[in-house]
Image (cartoon, rainbow, N blue to C red):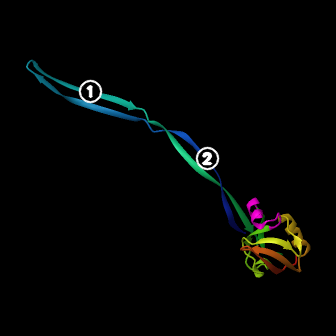
Amino acid sequence: MIGIVVSQDYSHTVSGTYTATGPSQTVTTKESGSVYSAGGSAYYSGTSTTTIPGATREVPYSVNRYDFRAVYLVGKKYVFGANLVDLTDDERKKVGRNVGVRIDLVVKGTPAYLADLFADDIVLSFDGEDVRDVRQFIDLVDRNSGRDVDLVVLRDRKKLKVTVALASH
């Protein structure tokens, strides 16, 4: 099985702060020595221990989140051989109609590949019937497996008629 990341779309940014506290430190000091004066001398020694608490800080963070979409290809025979997605609102506006599906990925060696279809082609019709969405396109492919079908495809703002020899189930 082969997994291919088809797209990644920015979703949102998560921001906040977290509290970080460093470790405490213990410092031990040892002192000794002699003191001399006119009245005599003395010897001293001592030890002192000081514990310094760890510093606490608020640390800011920002993480960008993405949604990934992948296609998993299993070694099998493809009737058509492309991954399709429904058109976005912006794509429908560019097409000027509420019909069509966009080819997202074409599998090498499949009927779609052999018919010279490419990623980002927009399929407008299937054998004269407008294509409304991916589900309808898949149904049309299933009903017509083993036949040659004519697609009207929009590529670089030009309509093309493409004949695809669909494989049998």
For the point 18% across and 25% down, which residue is it?
43
Q: Is residue 22 left or right of residue 90?
A: left
Badge 2: residue crowd in 10 Å (few <14, some 14–19, many ≥20): few
Which residue, given by chain and number where applicable, does mark 1 sit on? Answer: 46
For the residues labelled 2 and 1, the Cα–Cα distance comes to 54 Å
- Name which residue type carries label 1: Gly
Q: Which residues are magenta?
A: 88-100
In the image shown, does 117 or 124 lie closer to the viewer? Answer: 124
Q: Position of residue 12 (x, y in %)?
A: 64, 50
> Residue 118 occupies which quadrant of the picture?
bottom right
Residue shown at 34%/29% (left/top)? 49
Q: Is residue 100 something that shows in the picture?
A: yes
Residue 76 visible in the displayed image: no
Identify the residue shown where x is 73% and y is 73%.
157
- Which mark is in front, 2 or 1? 2
Q: Which residue is mark 2?
A: 14
Residue nearest the observer in this picture, 49 or 71: 71
Q: Residue 47's image quarter?
A: top left
Residue 76 position within the rendered picture, expressed as x and y whole percent measured from the top left: 79, 74
